[in-house]
Amino acid sequence: MHKSFAFGTAVLLGLAACAQDNNGITGLAADRAVDIAPSAAVSADAPGAVYALTWLGSVATGGSGAGSSLGSQGAVALSDDGRWLFAVNAGSDDISAFQITPPGLALTSRVASGGIRPISVTVHDNVVYVLNAGGDGNISGFTVGNGGALTPIAGSTRSLSGSAVGPAQVAFSPNARWLVVTEKATNRLDVYAVGSDGSASAANTTASAGGTPFGFAFGHRDELFVSEATGSASSYTIDDSGALALASGAVLTHQGAPCWAVVTKNGKFGYTANAQGGSISGFAVANDGSIGLIDADGRTAVVGGGNIDLAVSGNSRYLYQLTGNRSISGFRIEADGHLTAVGNIAGLPASTVGLVAR
């Protein structure tokens, strides 16, 4: 079974399910978490499979949304073991934690985000960090207790490179030694070292190779794949000191506004959702972290205007895309990185933003 979660200005959770696989999608909408499940008459990986996404329900986050786009990636995050879901509440300046159980989601905790207007959240093991975009902006850390309770980490709140930097995403590196933040307004990437107690260092800031760095994802060798809303994507490697080294700089997508980015778990492929191009661009990722378009025109999939997020299933067989008309489309990732459409569900709440899958 695939499960998917989608969120918006409240919290929306979407679950997508397929035969044989235990994956899902979740999204956020102003105050709801929504479950959507894909189903298949035969194995979803078999030729001729009949694949459909089915709405399962929604759960209140206890907080409130912003009532508008967050301009971010990572409004929701799943724990490494798939047991916990975390969502930002940008309108009430807090974050919510849910336990994921067979019947659905159960709200376990809701705490102040440590700043104003939280827009992105990330988790590794029992440590959660949130990115606050309001005011001067900051990151702030929390531990996750056995029952899902969130507790602030003393001294974990850190500033960004300056004020009014237009942050877009925060995420852990795969080894959890680093946190990365993209800054759209300054064209910078911030890297924070994470200590054994979960506290973050001051930021080490690097200039972005392309304009308006937005979403990003890590490959399994800690290579960093970044979408750049001016029309490109770049990749970097990160060394033992946390310094970023450019692998491929500002590779054009030939599509408008590539804002959201994902990488398959095996690190072979990266994808950007192009908001103005109405498309998804696929990239092959080499062992040295360098990237190149799978399709010369940048159109690995044509999906229509207004796509607003991407998520990859836990087994990297499926890619899910959230659109501005609040529908979710599913694609099977082929061996060469090309995409085959497999299903769609429409009618999500109007405020839905954010998407995760397992």
Image (cartoon, grey):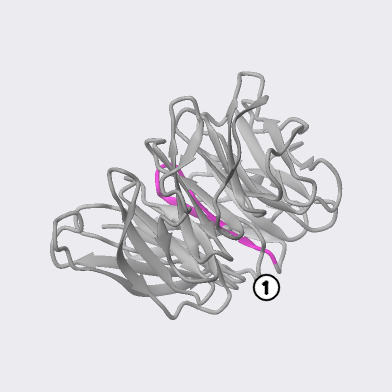
The N terminus - image quarter: bottom left
Residue at x 31%, y 73% (from the top left corner) = 54
Residue 258 as seen in the image, left or right of residue 104: right
Residue lying furthest front in this view?
A: 296
For the magenta stretch, what is the residue range?
Answer: 76-90
Where is residue 244, by image quadrant?
Answer: top right
How would you rate the neighbour count of disc 1 (Cα within 10 Å): few for under 14, some for 14-19, many for 20 or more?
some
**Residue 340's spot in the image, x, y percent?**
30, 59
Residue lying furthest top in this view?
A: 240
Decide which of 260, 355 is in the foreground and name it.
260
**Residue 292's spot in the image, x, y percent?**
48, 39
Q: Main secondary structure of the magenta part?
A: strand
Residue at x 78%, y 52% (from the top left corner) = 185
Decide which of 100, 118 is in the foreground and name it.
118
Mark 1: secondary structure: loop
Q: Is residue 354 visible?
A: no
**Residue 143's spot in the image, x, y percent?**
60, 42
Residue 194 as seen in the image, left or right of residue 161: left
Where is residue 48, by image quadrant?
Answer: bottom left
Reply above or below: 130 against 242.
below
Residue at x 54%, y 44% (from the top left corner) = 145
Q: Is residue 149 visible?
A: yes
Residue at the disc numbered 1: 68
Where is residue 229, by image quadrant?
Answer: bottom right
Would residue 168 be counted in the magenta stretch?
Answer: no
Residue at x 50%, y 30% (from the top left corner) = 289
User: Mark 1: which amino acid?
Assistant: Ser
Residue 156 as seen in the image, left or right of residue 11: right
Decide which of 151, 198 is in the foreground and name it.
198
Would residue 78 be counted in the magenta stretch?
Answer: yes
